[in-house]
Image: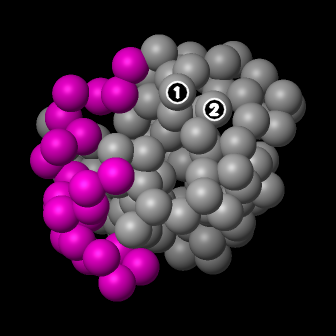
Amino acid sequence: MPNSRIAKMPVAKVYPLYVTKVEKKGRTQAEVDEVITWLTGYSEAGLQQALTENRDFETFFAQAPQLNPHAKQITGMICGYRVEDIADPLMQQIRYLDKLVDELAKGKPMAKILRT
């Protein structure tokens, strides 16, 4: 399922869509930032820098300080695929992020989203 078009898409282009999606469901931008920093290991400042620099998803994940060791616990369907079955590591990381934002928008408690 490698899709170079998605990998080359700037995270800053998708980020406002994530925020809009969760805000429509009563969640906040701060919560979006929290799930992104949890997954990637970026600090809040590091995340803002990545967005300002317009990093694409490939660079964003390649430069992420450390993918959360609990990310493997993210399972389920997103965009018609089972996240745990995606073979391409980059696409899996992108779909992990999509899944976390989805769970946030569906009102799941933050403790469950962050697998604590």
Amino acid residing under circle 1:
Ala
Residue 58 on image: x %, y %: 59, 40
Residue 21 on image: x %, y %: 61, 71
Q: Can residue 88 be seen by looking at this rendering?
A: yes
| Residues marked 1 and 2 touching at CB (< 8 Å) | yes
Tell me the element at label 2. helix
- How crowded is the residue under tag 1: few (<14 C-alpha within 10 Å), some, or many (20+)? few
* Residue segment shown in magenta: 66-88
Q: Can residue 19 be seen by looking at this rendering?
A: no
Looking at the rendering, which quadrant does residue 85 occupy?
A: bottom left
Asked if residue 49 lies in the magenta stretch, the reply is no
Residue 112 on image: x %, y %: 21, 51
Residue 56 on image: x %, y %: 70, 43
Tell me the element at label 1. helix
Mark 1 and mark 2: Cα distance apart in space: 5 Å
Q: Tell me: residue 39, above or below residue 1.
A: above
Residue drawn at (45%, 61%), measured in percent from left and top? 2
Amino acid residing under circle 2:
Thr
Residue drawn at (74%, 36%), measured in percent from left and top? 55
Residue found at the very far bottom of the displayed protein: 80
Q: Which residue is mark 2?
A: 59
Residue drawn at (42%, 55%), measured in percent from left and top? 91
Looking at the rendering, which quadrant does residue 20 occupy?
A: bottom right
Q: Which residue is mark 1?
A: 62
Q: Nearer the viewer, residue 49 or 5?
A: 5
Asked if residue 79 lies in the magenta stretch, the reply is yes
Residue drawn at (69%, 51%), measured in percent from left and top? 8
